[in-house]
């Protein structure tokens, strides 16, 4: 097996360097949620720094990610182009690359992936209804003006309800890219076991898979067409301090759409709290996770080990029922292989 020393491991390191040591044409699916390069959320960000109010810019209470800077997109493109080039190298022909982004810088991400040589196949939208409204009123700035209190109140009333141009974001775009197939799609599937989509993976009310996904109930029409299994509350874990944990059901859905065979390898170069690895492991597939933050490595490993604890209970229940033991034992051994 290729990448034998890296398969089913969570690796601490800079993904740009680690990816160079992954064998070419060896990965089936890459699914990741990279740094978005909004202020302080670049490839060197640290959890403690982002959450330290002493580092906040412009206004002390301004949450990270709300400062506008034109250089953010340029730096993001330059960095992610290098990442995408490495991913292009390690993907099998026909292999898929899914990458979460922010609406504001999605165009930079898609351009970097496109310019790295991949085919942009689609854009998924993860739709949700609950999110922080980021628009700010001008009252804070008005209070700092060297004018009378009466004039300050007059300005506040004049601009009441008018805020900075930042709407409440209720979706995340996910670029869907693919390394070009070797010959026809059929020839590529026969040779590389990757390249097509499994349209038997249904969503909502047994609907054909679409490029809009939601794990929250929104309304009857949207739920019928786009809803996938709602994530359980316990899937995150009380120990998980990651700021942007992605729903396990969402990652499982994307992997099931694309990973064709049982030895498929799913890679996440920014594994964070480990959701991609957990999803792959739950589906009985191989994974490789990479992250530069040691605290996230620990969280990922704890979540992966948690799968074994849950499945041990399932195994015990099935043994008590005295059916399917042989099949269950085989699946259990596959799922609970060593995580590190």
Image (cartoon, helix red, strand yellow):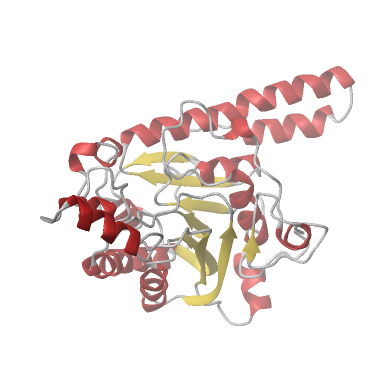
Image point (46%, 49%), residue name: 132
Left or right: residue 253 versus residue 93 is: right
Say if residue 262 shows up in the picture: yes
94 vs 126: above or below = below
The answer to which image quadrant residue 212 occupies is bottom right
x 21%, y 58%: residue: 151
When the figure is inspected, residue 319 is found, relative to residue 303, above or below; the finding is above
Rendered location of residue 181, percent (x, y): 56, 77
| Residue 231, horizontal then vertical, whole percent | 65, 41
Q: Is residue 36 above or below residue 273?
A: below
Asked if 323 appears above or below 296 in the picture, the reply is above
Q: Which residue lies most toward the bottom here?
A: 183
Which of the 4 image quarters holds residue 233?
top right
Q: Position of residue 103 (x, y in %)?
A: 44, 65
Horizontal side of 281 relative to 271 (left or right) equals right
Q: Residue furthest front?
A: 150
Q: Residue at x 61, y 46 (%)?
A: 285
Q: Nearer the viewer, residue 279 or 52?
A: 52
Residue 95 picture location, percent across and down: 54, 66
Q: Is residue 2 visible?
A: no
Foreground of the two, 58 or 175 = 58
Q: How many marks?
A: 0
Relative horizontal placement of residue 191, taking residue 296 as reference (left or right):
right
Choose between 180 and 65: the one closer to the eye.
65
Quadrant where the C terminus sits is top left
């Amino acid at each position: 097996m290729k990448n034998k020393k890296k398969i089913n491991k969570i690796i601490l390191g800079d993904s740009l360097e680690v990816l160079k040591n992954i064998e070419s044409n060896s990965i089936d699916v890459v699914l990741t949620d990279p740094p978005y390069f909004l202020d302080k959320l670049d490839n060197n960000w640290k959890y403690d720094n982002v959450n330290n109010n002493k580092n906040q810019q412009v206004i002390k209470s301004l949450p990270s990610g709300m400062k506008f800077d034109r250089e953010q997109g340029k730096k993001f493109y330059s960095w992610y182009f290098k990442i995408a080039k490495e991913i292009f190298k390690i993907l099998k022909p026909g292999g898929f690359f899914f990458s979460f982004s922010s609406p504001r810088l999605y165009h930079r991400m898609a351009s970097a992936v496109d310019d790295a040589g991949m085919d942009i196949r689609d854009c998924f939208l993860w739709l949700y209804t609950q999110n922080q409204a980021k628009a700010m009123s001008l009252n804070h700035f008005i209070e700092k003006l060297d004018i009378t209190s009466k004039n300050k109140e007059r300005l506040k009333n004049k601009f009441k309800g008018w805020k900075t141009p930042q709407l409440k974001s209720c979706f995340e775009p996910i670029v869907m890219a693919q390394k070009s197939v070797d010959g026809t799609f059929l020839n590529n599937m026969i040779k590389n076991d990757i390249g097509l989509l499994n349209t038997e993976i249904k969503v909502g009310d047994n609907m054909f898979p679409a490029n809009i996904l939601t794990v929250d109930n929104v309304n009857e029409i949207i739920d019928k067409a786009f809803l996938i299994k709602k994530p359980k509350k316990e899937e995150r874990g009380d120990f998980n301090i990651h700021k942007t944990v992605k729903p396990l059901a969402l990652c499982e859905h994307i992997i099931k759409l694309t990973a064709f065979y049982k030895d498929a390898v799913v890679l996440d170069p920014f594994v964070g709290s480990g959701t991609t690895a957990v999803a792959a492991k739950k589906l009985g597939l191989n994974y490789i996770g990479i992250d530069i933050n040691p605290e996230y490595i620990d969280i990922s490993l704890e979540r992966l080990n948690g799968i074994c604890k849950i499945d041990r209970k399932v195994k015990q229940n099935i043994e008590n029922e005295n059916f399917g033991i042989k099949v269950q034992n085989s699946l259990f051994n596959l799922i609970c292989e060593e995580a590190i």
